[in-house]
Structures are given as structure tokens and as C-alpha cells.
């Protein structure tokens, strides 16, 4: 039996490893090099057997959407009931991935359309998404960028990253850079060091964010050396991607602790997935475990319309039901924002139960999580509303050097403003373009 299989089997069965084997197991490069990519390996490691027919369909699926699972993540699967295991479902190919529904899209979020240079998606006014790696430790079956998974042509080289950096350098409105991928933490420490250093040199970049699933699928990536690299640079935020309480293990806790102790604020983005976490009880357990490990739930995503994800999609109602079960029932900072990333590239749209029931010219009617209906009296005299953008004459104190310096208001906010005469927003007109 080869080493990968014997080590992973022992781990799954919670057996002691020899010091040499343990050293391999906890070496992230060993984990990446030994990522499980075939049906036969999965059968051997989990001690299960697929039928000939299953195997046939599954091989078709992974020909189309490749499979790659870190031995660590695979070792978390409960073999007694693997078909319902949340780890197995996120990692292992499902024949239903090949059922393309009518409304499925290759690039539902319009990321390629909003891309000024390869690797950059610039959709919001002040921030960009920078795809710095197309490689992942594990290929999540629910990946919204499934179209690119395993696409070896898109492994950005340094020159490629330099083009992205150049764009950011030449675009002063960008104050927030979100490093994503693929997984940025699959880059080498040296590359990460270089990239963060380059971003730090750009004066208008105020914060850098990293989106990585390594704390979940490859916790050993969070090495002491990586922490030293991260600590060397400017303000860094990190979002990870736990979907189920089962993923919070001793190893992932250790990784999160190291990151938090390095002073990096941690957030989590979950995806609502049918058969994995579409349950208020599971979600509550997840957000509790996250906050116990210094991670603030940030977003809960409605599953995108990417090809191959139909079997993972839930109704939006399920998401709202989950939000209803969290708000008020648990710590406010444990409640994520539930969002639908608008198909076609409209960005993230928050959705939630209605708390504002009705209003008149002097009262608003609200309901709380228990169903108590209450009234809030508006102030009798409030004149803060009229703004003509003469900030230099305004009594509110803010640091503003030039009139209107950063006071651009676009989108629906501009309809609310007093200084903009427009009464409608028409798609395709100037205002839409300003949003970029
Ligand atoms: C999600 C996303 C961001 C970041 O959005 P926040 O709401 O600020 O977290 C930026 N750009 C793109 C294209 C995104 O999809």
C-alpha cells in the first residue's frame, strides 16, 4: 500500500503515526503533493467501493470537473455514513454535476466581463478582486469559479501579477485589495512576501484582504514562517470559508489561533449548500464555533448559478429562515449577512427578513425576533437631512481638503441625496458606469 494511503487511513482511524509519518502529515507541501485525485484512492482510503456504473459516471464527472482533495480533509470523512457526510459532499465529485440546468452560467458573476486586466475584477467603486493564484489545495465541488478549476493556463506568473499591480497603482480609487484565486496561500512564502510588499508601496491602498480556505482544508499551511511574513506587512484582513461545524478541528483551531495572535482580524464566508448546512441548527452551531475561535461570520452566500452546482442550490427562503433563527437568538456579532451575488455581475445583494413593518410621517412600526411589534417615534425637529455638498461650510467636522473631494455619490444613494437632480436611475446610463 502506498504511503499516502496508509498515512491517511491511519489518521482517519485516529491511529498514532510514527514521528516520520507525522512530520509528513503536517507538512503542507506533502499534503498538496499528495492530493487525492482518483476514485481508486478514495475507495482505498475510505474503505468503500463504488459500483461499476457509479464509477463510470463519476469518471465522466471528474474528467469535466477535476477532483483534488487534501489527505487531511479527506481524513475527516465519516465512513459509516459517507454519502451524507458534509466533508465528503464538499470534496467528492457528484454525478449530478453534469446536469446543466437551463439557467446555469459559466461565469454567473460576470467576473470576466468586469475585468480590466487579466486577474483583476473591478466591480465596486473603491475595491478590487485580485486573482493571484488559480490553484487550490482542494477543489471545492461548490466552487463558483468551477469553470477555471484545474485550468493550468491560468497560473499567474510574476509578470502576470505585475500587470495587476500596475492596474492598482494606476487606479487611485482603489483603497481595498482583495486577494483571491484560487487560493493565495498556495503561493510560496516568498511570493506572498513580495506581493504584500508591492501592495504596501502603493499609497492609496489602505487595506489588503486575503480570501483563503487553507485553515479549513490545509491548516498546516499556516506555518510560523508564513505568520512572520504576514506580520511584516501593513493592514491585513483575512476571510476563510468554513461551511460546517465538523470542519472546525484541533488542527484548524491551531491555524486560526496563530492568525489571530498575529493581529489579523478573521472573518468567515459560508455558502449555503443543500445537504451540507441548510439547517438553522447546523448554522447556529457553526457560528458559535467560529466565534469561539475568534472568527466573525461575515457572509452567508446563496449558492451561485454556476454550471454543475444545481444539486447544491437551496431556495432563498431557506436562507431567510436561517437568518430569522440567528438574529436576536444569538450574539449579534455571530450573525453573518446573507447575500445573493447577483447573476450577471451586479454584486452582492443582502437579503433578510423584514423588520420594518410600516411607517407614517412620524412613526415607524417594527417587529423584533420574538414577534413583538413596536413603534419608534421620529424626532419632532430634525434638519440634518438637507445636504448641498458644501462640506467646507458644514458644521459636521470632517477632514476635507478640497470641496467634494471624496463625496461622489452614485447608485441608489444618489437618488436619496439633495444635490443630485436625477429622479430615476436608468441602467446603461452614466450612473451605472460610475459604479465601476
Ligand atoms: C465580493 C467582492 C468584493 C468585496 O465585497 P465586500 O462586500 O466589500 O466584501 C469585491 N469585488 C468583487 C468583484 C467581489 O465579488
Image (spheres, grey):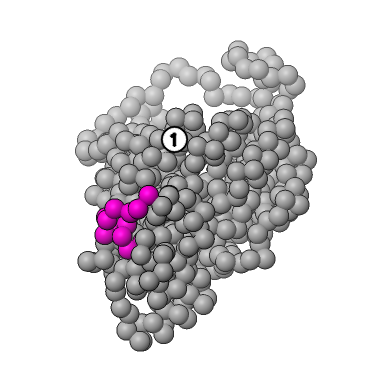
- 215 sits left or right of 385 in the view: left
Mark 1: is the Cβ under 8 angstroms from ligand 1? no
Residue 160 part of the magenta-drawn span: no
Q: Is residue 123 visible?
A: no
- 140 sits left or right of 405 in the view: left
Pointer 1: residues within 10 angstroms few (<14), some, or many (20+)? some
* Residue at image point 36% right, 82% down: 54
* Residue at image point 29% right, 71% down: 47
- Which residue is at the far bottom? 52
* Residue at image point 76% right, 52% down: 159
Task: Kindly identify which residue carries mark 1.
Answer: 258
Q: How many marks?
A: 1
* Residue at image point 60% right, 14% down: 397
Q: Which secondary structure lies at badge 1?
A: helix
Q: Nearer the viewer, residue 56 or 282?
A: 56
Q: Position of residue 150 (x, y in %)?
A: 57, 66
Region rendered in magenta: 8-19
Q: Nearer the viewer, residue 344 or 210?
A: 210
Q: Position of residue 34 (x, y in %)?
A: 48, 62
133 lies above or below 360: below
Q: Is residue 37 visible?
A: yes
Q: Position of residue 125 (x, y in %)?
A: 65, 41
Amino acid at each position: 500500500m502506498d504511503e499516502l494511503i496508509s498515512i491517511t487511513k491511519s489518521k482517519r482511524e485516529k491511529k498514532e503515526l510514527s514521528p516520520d509519518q507525522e512530520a509528513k502529515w503536517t507538512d503542507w507541501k506533502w499534503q498538496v503533493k499528495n492530493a487525492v485525485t482518483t476514485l481508486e484512492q478514495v475507495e482505498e482510503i475510505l474503505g468503500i467501493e463504488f459500483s461499476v456504473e457509479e464509477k463510470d459516471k463519476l469518471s465522466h464527472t471528474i474528467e469535466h470537473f477535476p477532483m483534488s482533495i487534501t489527505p487531511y480533509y479527506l481524513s475527516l470523512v465519516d465512513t459509516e455514513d459517507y454519502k451524507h457526510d458534509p466533508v465528503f459532499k464538499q470534496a467528492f465529485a457528484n454525478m449530478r454535476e453534469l446536469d446543466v440546468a437551463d439557467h446555469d452560467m459559466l461565469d454567473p458573476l460576470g467576473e470576466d466581463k468586469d475585468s480590466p486586466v487579466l486577474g483583476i475584477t473591478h466591480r465596486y467603486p473603491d475595491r478590487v478582486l485580485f486573482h493571484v493564484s488559480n490553484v487550490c489545495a482542494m477543489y471545492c465541488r461548490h466552487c463558483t469559479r468551477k469553470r477555471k478549476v484545474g485550468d493550468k493556463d491560468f497560473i499567474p506568473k510574476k509578470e502576470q501579477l505585475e500587470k495587476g499591480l500596475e492596474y492598482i497603482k494606476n487606479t487611485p480609487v482603489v483603497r481595498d485589495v482583495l486577494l483571491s484565486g484560487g487560493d493565495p496561500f498556495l503561493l510560496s512564502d516568498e511570493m506572498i512576501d513580495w506581493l504584500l510588499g508591492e501592495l504596501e508601496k502603493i499609497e492609496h491602498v489602505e487595506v489588503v484582504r486575503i480570501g483563503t480556505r487553507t485553515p479549513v482544508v490545509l491548516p498546516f499551511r499556516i506555518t510560523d514562517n508564513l505568520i512572520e511574513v504576514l506580520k511584516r506587512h501593513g493592514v491585513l484582513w483575512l476571510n476563510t470559508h468554513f461551511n460546517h461545524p465538523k470542519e472546525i478541528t484541533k488542527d484548524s483551531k491551531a491555524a486560526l489561533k496563530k492568525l489571530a495572535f498575529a493581529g489579523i482580524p478573521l472573518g468567515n464566508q459560508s455558502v449555503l449548500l443543500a445537504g451540507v448546512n441548510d439547517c438553522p441548527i447546523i448554522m447556529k452551531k457553526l457560528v458559535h464555533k467560529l466565534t469561539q475561535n475568534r472568527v466573525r461570520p461575515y457572509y452567508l452566500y446563496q449558492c451561485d448559478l454556476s454550471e454543475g452546482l444545481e444539486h447544491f442550490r437551496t431556495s432563498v427562503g431557506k436562507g431567510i429562515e436561517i437568518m430569522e433563527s440567528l438574529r436576536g437568538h444569538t450574539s449579534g456579532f455571530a450573525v453573518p449577512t446573507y447575500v445573493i451575488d447577483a447573476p450577471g455581475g451586479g454584486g452582492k445583494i443582502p437579503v433578510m427578513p423584514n423588520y420594518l413593518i410600516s411607517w407614517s410621517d412620524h412613526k415607524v412600526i417594527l417587529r423584533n425576533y420574538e414577534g413583538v411589534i413596536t413603534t419608534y417615534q421620529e424626532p419632532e425637529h430634525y434638519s440634518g437631512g438637507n445636504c448641498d455638498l458644501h462640506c467646507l461650510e458644514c458644521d459636521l467636522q470632517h477632514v476635507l481638503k478640497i470641496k467634494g473631494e471624496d463625496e461622489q455619490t452614485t447608485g441608489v444613494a444618489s437618488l436619496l441625496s439633495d444635490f443630485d437632480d436625477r429622479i430615476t436611475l436608468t441602467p446603461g446610463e452614466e450612473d451605472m458606469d460610475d459604479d465601476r
